[in-house]
Image: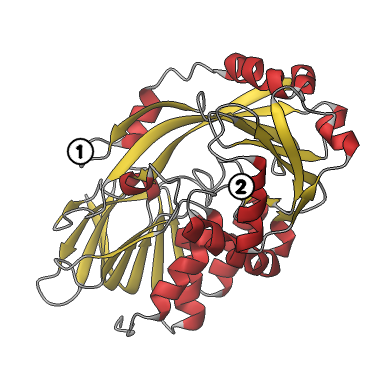
């Protein structure tokens, strides 16, 4: 049963941080009058925007990708300035370099940080004592933050309302097609089983793991993607680690970071966080694969390995795990780079696909959009 057909300047598919930020940008900065934001969940920013490590990168994580590291270094102060209400800074952030199996030495890491202009200094003795010295070469105190996804969601809700964006929750886009007259048509399905369509001049596909799950005249992204089902463990940190964030690198190691949305810490491990993966393709819905997965936690294995380097982790209390689909660009698997995906679809003029691997990549997206021309056409 078709409810109605409406007109809009633009349709944003996906109500995560990127979709919301793009909708607000188009309304406030580019003068588009009628914008529709479609989100298949019952609220905004509740999937990948929430189910992650909540790290605002400052470049330290990417010694094998100078471009990604430098962009993070440039974007972090902008992000802190634009969303101060969502940022947690009041903790000590440590990067420790393992003596064995690390792809970067302490000397190389320190040199790399100086090259990108990121603050770094040796940690004081009290913080170094957190680590097993036989396994850790050096510990550095750095400047890196985390964000509260619930506060970003509150910002998005308020800004979308103030700018007049038509937010449609529990509404999933199913197809993007060429209009027989002009522009594009987005077909939707709501949770009550009703179908709808929106005629528009522009479509922004910000569905993250669902980028290639749209039918109609949409042929998918040219960039090859990989999907991973991942586990982010949430733990109650022992007192000695409560105001500390830790990353041991740069091999099969781990991070333990504050998670402000819950007042807990995330625990992730390169070996155990990804549970399984597959190459993305149309017709294989990543969210259905996640839904069917049994979600057996690997936190015991994480803690067992992490405890060798950071003995006090054995005093942490496991609370639960966040399981989510993580989408990565196959071309960057070897260098850990996290560039944005920004594709204009030639077969559908006015249609864009957008994906970012880190929250601060939003500025890279907005820079791309600044170069585009947009015209208000909705009546």
Indicate how the structure is coloured in the image.
secondary structure
Does dot 1 land on a helix, a strand or a loop? loop
* Residue ID at (30%, 83%): 379
Q: Residue 341 appears at what percent x and percent y? A: 36, 58
Q: In this rendering, is residue 59 above or below 270?
A: below
123 on left or right of 279: right
Against 121, residue 266 (above or below) is above
Instruction: Tell me the residue at 67%/67% (across/down).
Output: 77
Q: Is residue 246 visible?
A: yes
Q: Residue at x 52, y 30 (%)?
A: 270
**From this viewpoint, which residue is outermost toward the left?**
180
Q: Which mark is residue 283?
A: 1
* 350 displayed left or right of 275: left
Which residue occupies the foreground of this view, 307 or 98? 98
* Helix, strand or loop at mark 2: helix
Q: How many marks?
A: 2
Q: Which residue is mark 2?
A: 108
User: Along the line of sight, which residue is nearer the eye, 312 or 100?
Assistant: 100
**Could you tell me if the residues under marks 2 and 1 are in contact, i.e. CB atoms within 8 Å?**
no
Residue 305: image location, x then y, percent: 63, 18
Q: Indicate the quadrant where residue 261 lies.
A: top right
| Label 1 packing within 10 angstroms: few (<14), some (14-19), many (20+) | few
Residue 262 in the image, given as x and y percentages of width and height: 71, 38
Q: Which mark is residue 215?
A: none
Q: Is residue 193 visible?
A: no
Q: Earlier in the sequence, mark 2 or mark 1?
A: 2
- What's the residue at 47%, 31% (across, down)? 230
Mark whose residue sits in front, 2 or 1:
2
In the rendered image, the vertical position of residue 190 relative to residue 20, given as above or below: above
Neighbor class of circle 2 (other Cα within 10 Å; few <14, some 14-19, many 20+) is few
Q: Distance between the Cα atoms at labels 2 and 1?
A: 44 Å
Q: 164 or 68, which lies in front?
A: 68
């Amino acid at each position: 049963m078709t409810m109605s057909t409406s007109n809009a300047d633009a349709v944003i598919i996906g109500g995560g941080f990127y979709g919301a930020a793009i909708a607000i940008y188009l309304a406030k900065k580019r003068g588009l009058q009628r914008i529709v934001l479609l989100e298949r969940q019952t609220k905004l920013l509740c999937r990948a925007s929430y189910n992650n490590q909540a790290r605002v990168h400052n470049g330290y994580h990417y010694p094998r990708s100078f471009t990604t590291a430098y962009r993070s270094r440039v974007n972090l102060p902008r992000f802190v300035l634009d969303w101060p209400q969502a940022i947690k800074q009041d903790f000590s952030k440590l990067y420790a370099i393992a003596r064995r199996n690390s792809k970067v030495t302490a000397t190389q890491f320190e040199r790399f940080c100086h090259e990108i202009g990121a603050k770094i200094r040796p940690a004081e003795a009290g913080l170094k004592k957190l680590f097993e010295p036989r396994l850790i070469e050096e510990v550095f105190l750095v400047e890196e933050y985390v964000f509260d996804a619930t506060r970003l969601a509150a910002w998005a809700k308020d800004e979308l309302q103030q700018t007049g964006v038509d937010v449609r929750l529990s509404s999933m886009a199913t197809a993007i097609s060429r209009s027989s007259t002009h522009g594009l048509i987005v077909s939707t399905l709501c949770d009550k089983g009703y179908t709808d369509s929106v005629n528009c001049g522009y479509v922004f596909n910000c569905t993250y793991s669902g980028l290639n799950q749209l039918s109609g005249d949409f042929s998918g992204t040219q960039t090859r993607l990989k999907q991973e089902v991942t586990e982010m463990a949430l733990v109650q940190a022992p007192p000695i680690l409560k105001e500390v964030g830790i990353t041991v690198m740069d091999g099969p190691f781990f991070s333990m970071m504050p998670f402000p949305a819950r007042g807990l810490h995330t625990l992730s491990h390169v070996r155990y966080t990804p549970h399984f993966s597959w190459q993305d393709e149309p017709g294989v819905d990543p969210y259905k694969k996640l839904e069917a997965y049994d979600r057996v936690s690997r936190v015991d294995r994480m803690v067992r390995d992490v405890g060798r380097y950071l003995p006090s982790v054995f005093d942490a209390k496991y609370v639960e795990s966040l399981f989510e689909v993580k989408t990565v660009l196959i071309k960057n698997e070897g260098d850990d780079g996290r560039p944005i995906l920004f594709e204009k679809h030639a077969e559908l003029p006015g249609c864009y696909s957008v994906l970012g691997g880190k929250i601060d990549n939003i500025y890279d997206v907005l820079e791309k959009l600044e170069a585009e021309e947009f015209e208000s056409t909705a009546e």
